[in-house]
Amino acid sequence: MSRGLHARFVSGVLLPLHERLKGHATIARSRELEKSQWLSGEELSRRQEIRLQEFLREIGSRVPYYRDLFTSLRVRPEQVRKASDLPAIPVLTKAQIREHGAALAADGVSDLRAVSTGGSTGEPLRFRVGPARVTSDVALRRRANRWWGVDIGDPEVVLWGSHIEVTRQDRVRTIRDRLFRSTLLSVNHMTPEVLDQYLDALPRLRPVQIFSHPSALDELARRADERGRRLDGLGIRVIFLTAEELYQHQRERIERVFGCRASNGYGGRDSGFIAQECPEGGMHLNVEDIVVEIVGDDGTVLPPGKPGEIVVTHLRSQEYPFVRYRTGDVGVLGDEACSCGRGLPLLREVHGRADDLLLGLDGARVPGQVVVLLFRDIPGIAAFKVVQEEVDRVRILLVRTDEFPATAEASIVEGFRERLGATMRVEIQLVDSIPREASGKYRTVVSKVGPSPAREATEPRGGGTSDAE
């Protein structure tokens, strides 16, 4: 079966069947989103207001946490008619989700899926998502992929570091990935030998699209340069980058080595699929399903052009609501129109996690995202920060609660040594709080040795993500 026929078979037959069996209305939602992106900004705002009112009425009646909150504040959902009215509702923090997690689940909903994230701000989080939220995320991501002429079913290579994606390759998932022509390459330990194996695999796999952390793919591009390997004739149409801040020097090297455009994405397991870059360079906000506010230090909602914290309301999270959720990332809204013609507004800048590359004892460069995931499923961690002080020494600042298991420190040390080297000195320092950088950002992983995107280029461009899906 030719590439085109197989891709059409997957997107037209296998994907609808797959989503229907999971109870998700992804195909219908995809059709709606394909049409709505071309509406005017005014019409999109009107539709967003209608959906916001429906959403708040539903959670005000079905979600215990918001039912009680609205009553205590004497806020009626119908009073919040548009995005500018949202400050009547307090922001939602990770600490509040940890404290009130059970009360955030809607009454009568039994098909919530547990999700955990390491968190871009170093605060691990466990929460739940329902079918409507999952449907939204898949449909929005599919729409963004189609901007670049690719779809589910086109050959794909995923360079990723999540232990979920790397280790849970059971028989059903393996069969599904083969049918959908998706190949996972782990970035948990990128030694020169492993990078060479990946360089050998790409011509055989001939992906149409690549999905990766910026730092991981930049490392592969570096290795290709060192070995004189040409990857610009493989037929790759687009590279989707997310989960870290994308620096201009990384973009330039990746696009040159792979011979295609890179598309920057912003979102997370917790906040949803917020924005994606189109071929004309605009980072479009998915306003049909997500409201984005830029909030200053004093809680004031800021206008376009002003930097502040990104606060998100996910309008398809009614089963487990995220309302005015603090992402911990800094962003700037744009008020200009994109030349692509879509009415979707723009996120002009986003500065999320600026993780450095850690250096393993054997010379392997390990993306910060890989070690961040070690903290994801450990209870009792309020915040953390990883600093590689020397080639053979890592210091971990840890803010813990009473739920922190006695055995967790040993588990953390073991995890770092598995990824960085058996004799790596791993020091855990218990602290009451972790200060932010002078810039106001909160860097989760900092390397004082080896290559660092933040040191190699002073001008970051584009976005990142709170935590990749």
Image (cartoon, grey):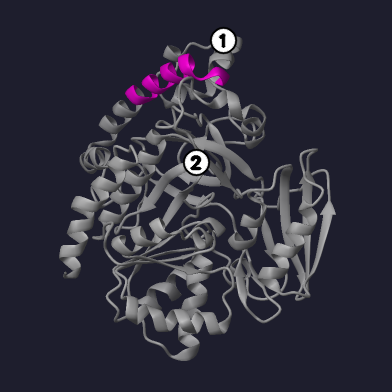
**Residue 336 appears in view:** yes
- Read off the residue under disc 2: 271
Q: Is residue 159 left or right of residue 441?
A: left
Q: Quadrant of the N terminus?
A: bottom left
Q: CA distance from mark 1 to mark 2?
A: 25 Å
Q: Residue at x 50, y 88 (%)?
A: 226
Q: Amino acid at mark 1?
A: Thr
Q: Classify 10 Å Cα crowding around label 1: few (below 14), some (14-19), many (20 and above).
A: few
**How far across and down, in percent of the image, does residue 221 sit?**
46, 78
Instruction: Judge whether 282 appears above or below 58 on screen.
Output: below
**How far across and down, in percent of the image, does residue 372 sit?**
64, 57
Q: How many marks?
A: 2
Nearer to the camera, 102 or 61 = 102
Q: Residue at x 48, y 67 (%)?
A: 248
Q: Amino acid at mark 2?
A: Ser
Instruction: Judge whether 414 appears above or below 296 on screen.
Output: below
Q: Is residue 261 left or right of residue 443?
A: left
Q: Quadrant of residue 44?
A: top left
Q: Residue furthest bottom?
A: 228
Task: Label 2, secondary structure: give it.
Answer: loop
Magenta part of the chain: 50-65
Q: Classify 10 Å Cα crowding around label 2: few (below 14), some (14-19), many (20 and above).
A: many
**Residue 344 appears in view:** no
Q: Main secondary structure of the magenta part?
A: helix
**How far across and down, in percent of the image, does residue 170 sit?**
45, 59
Residue 379 highlighted magenta (yes or no):
no
Q: Which mark is residue 71?
A: 1
